[in-house]
Amino acid sequence: MISVRREMIKTQQEVQDYYGKQLQTSSDLKTNACCDPALMPEYLKPILAKIHPEVDSRYYGCGLVIPPLLEGLKILDLGSGAGRDVYLLSALVGKSGQVVGIDMTSEQLAIANEYKTFHAEQFQFPESNVQFIQGYLETLDELGLEEASFDIIVSNCVLNLSTDKLAVLKSAYKLLKPGGEFYFSDVYADRRIPQHLQNDPVLYGECLSGALYWNDFLNLSKQAGFLDPRLASDRPLTIENSKLESKVSPIKFYSATYRLFKLAELEPDCEDYGQAVKYLGGIPEHDAFFDLDGHHRFEQGKIEAVCGNTLRMLQNTRFEPYFEFYGNWQQHFGLFEGCGKQIPFQQQSTDAPCC
């Protein structure tokens, strides 16, 4: 147990060194994990233009962690770094909202704290609506954060750097309000990473060798209480360094954004109760249609059949005012067709003996 703890501390120190001293800007990274700002939605570009250049240059995220309907909400950013996502979110929650960033690297936090007043002035707020706390994601319970106090938790390419990913997921579940969501981007692998690669500090710092095998991530999420993880978007990662690429080959890596809802009523699988929803429109920047995840796009005015879990994700969350709901829970029709799981039994009779 002591040796495991020592190894965890060693890894944390190596990550702190990598992001605090070795990396000075996002251009120092050796993969294409960081998102291209040109791909950011148009409505966010004016806000991004107001982010201080020093904060923006130290952005190491691999996805866009800006879900809709944020005004007035309280948001937690796990692994907030120099604060780019925190400040983007602060503009969107408005002066009545709050964004808290957690990071373990003092050099990153120094930059984030330096520009609190600058960004409050840029967004024309009377005072800053952000707070930065130094701490470890594996021990969030030691930071004085109130349970069930956050509407949304975000994280951008940080879970893979954690030495105890299940602890982070469990803490996120505790810190969310009922109906809240953990909306985050991270790097995943198509298989489990061998230990000798996990011990490589550069591969780990580049968000590669600490990446979870995607199916292990799904199982850990369910253990933490997030019973139905939803994949919002994904893309393959390429490694812009031949030496690193040869080390990890043939492992494939992906950047993916998931949303995990804190809804105790969710079932392990998508069950069919004959229910349906209609999107009424009205969500800012999503008036014509709303994407709950990569498999559920709701067009305004169109009635769509949904599984019980999808209905709950819309009805028992901040999205409820923007939908009409049809049906009840009185009759069950089996698994919802097309949700990725099928009845395991043969559907045609065979001549095989029964005993």
Image: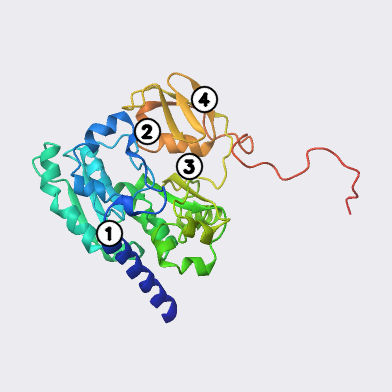
Could you tell me which secondary element the residue under label 1 belongs to? strand
Mark 2 is surrounded, within 10 Å at the Cα level, by few (under 14), some (14 to 19) or many (20 or more) other residues, namely some
x 85%, y 39%: residue: 349
Q: CA distance from mark 3 to mark 4?
A: 27 Å
Circles 4 and 1 in contact, beta carbons < 8 Å: no
Question: Percent position (x, y) of residue 43?
Answer: 28, 29
Q: How is the image coloured?
A: rainbow
Residue under pointer 2:
319
* Foreground: disc 2 or disc 3: 3
Residue under pointer 3:
235
Quadrant of the rendered structure where residue 70 is? top left
The residue lying furthest to the left in this view is 126
Mark 4 is surrounded, within 10 Å at the Cα level, by few (under 14), some (14 to 19) or many (20 or more) other residues, namely some
Question: Percent position (x, y) of residue 13?
Answer: 32, 70
Residue under pointer 4:
304
Circles 2 and 4 in contact, beta carbons < 8 Å: no
Whether residue 344 is visible here, answered yes or no, is yes
User: Considering only order in the chain, which callout, 1 or 4, is on the residue closer to the N terminus?
Assistant: 1
Amino acid carrying label 2: it is: Phe
The quadrant in which the N terminus is found is bottom left
